[in-house]
Image (cartoon, rainbow, N blue to C red):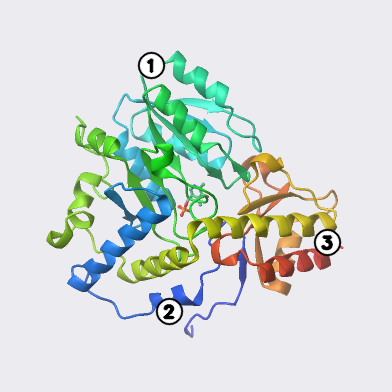
Amino acid sequence: MQYSTFIPEQRTLMGPGPSDVSPRVLNALARSTLGHLDPSFIGLMDEIKALLQYAFKTQNALTMPVSAPGSAGMEACFANLVEPGDKVAVCVNGVFGKRMVENVVRCGGEAVVIEDDWGQQTDLDKVDAALSADPAIKILAFVHAETSTGVRNDAQALCQLAKKYKCLSLVDAVTSLGGIEVDVDGWGIDAIYSGSQKCLSCVPGLSPVSFSPKAVEVIQARTHPVQSWFLDMNLIVGYWGKGGKRAYHHTAPVNSLYALHESLLMLHEEGLENAWQRHADGHRQLAQGLSSLGLDMAVDEAFRLPQLNVVRIPDGVDDADVRGRLLNEFNLEIGAGLGEFAGNVWRIGLMGHACKARNIDHCVASLGKVIN
Ligand SMILES: *Cc1c(COP(=O)(O)O)cnc(C)c1O
């Protein structure tokens, strides 16, 4: 067997993530590795924290990237806030809501599932009824941008309901952060996690999280230790939260953090509001293009995600064949349907750096050639 250096194809990534990573971020990744307690690296960590506070719109002191992908951020939020026997209301209208239920159960909690159809928003009246029926519910958990269905849930209204019933709010913002408005302090979110590889357009493998002062109190008042040593926030703050006095917890993924810093810097330079507008404009351009090909969007315009477009596959068109040809002939990746939507839809991502007019034209033109 002859081994050689792996050189990847130059693809355009327009699926559900990872999204295209800008050359600026890839260059940051290639810089020389520092020790993870080097004073110069610690300065970078402080900047990452400040830039994450900007992206999340929060003053939360406990804001940092977990050294693992979005699913680990999800796990960090549930593992730290849920104790055995706790009741957690979970809104489920897609794959990631279901994954939240799995997390609650594995923490020894009891999930109160509020279910809505795939492709529909979480029904606020159902949530109100569920929370009012059971005052023991401690947390309301939901997915802001459901990547499996392309639906935006009403995060602000759901957080208001959590407040009304004195629950903590726990929010999945993996696909929303950087693509649509997320306002942690303004909406009163208590625990939130995201991912590096969706609208932040960084390499996969990091999960920014943030906890409100109230969530931190709840974590510190636990009667059972957090089951996961690695994700226990009480221990992680010794590395991420102690200024110059940081102590070893685990070896930070140093170069990946250079990349995250650069991608957050790009978001800061562009400005959050401008990034949201760019995603909205890109969505409009894509929707027009798809409609000119006779393709229909699967989600109502009122609660559609601009960064994740779910498109119905026309009768008689072979899902896997189309995606395969886009990849092989046009170097373009789009996503397949997940779960209940498998085989019925494509998921076209306009995430972060990938959301630009040239990519959208390429996608519409390539799809047109492949399906006709
Ligand atoms: C991608 C995604 C996740 C999981 O993130 P990974 O980085 O793949 O672990 C969780 N929630 C949502 C809504 C996602 O889109």
Q: Residue at x 26, y 62 (%)?
A: 46
Residue corresponding to mark 3: 371
Measured as percent of width and height from the top left, residue 278 is found at 60, 60
Q: Is residue 252 visible?
A: no
Question: Counting residues from the N terminus, which is met first, the one under dot 3 or under dot 1?
Answer: 1
Q: Nearer the viewer, residue 59 or 30?
A: 59
Labels 2 and 3 touching (C-beta < 8 A): no
Q: Alpha-carbon neighbours of circle 3 within 10 Å: few (<14), some, or many (≥20)? A: some
Q: Alpha-carbon neighbours of circle 1 within 10 Å: few (<14), some, or many (≥20)? A: few
Q: Residue furthest top?
A: 133
Q: Residue at x 46, y 14 (%)?
A: 133
| Left or right: where 22 falls relative to 207 | right
Q: Amino acid at mark 1?
A: Pro
Q: Amino acid at mark 2?
A: Asn
Question: Counting residues from the N terminus, which is met first, the one under dot 2 or under dot 3?
Answer: 2
Residue corresponding to mark 2: 27
Q: Is residue 86 above or below residue 220?
A: above
Distance from mark 3 CB to nearest ligand 1 atom below 8 Å: no
Q: Amino acid at mark 3?
A: Ile
Question: Counting residues from the N terminus, which is met first, the one under dot 1 or under dot 2?
Answer: 2
Q: Residue at x 67, y 72 (%)?
A: 331
Residue 136, image quadrant = top left
How far apart are labels 1 and 2 at the CA level? 51 Å
Residue corresponding to mark 1: 135
Q: Is residue 177 above or below residue 363?
A: above
Residue 252, image quadrant = bottom left
How far apart are labels 2 and 3 at the CA level? 37 Å
Q: Residue furthest left?
A: 245
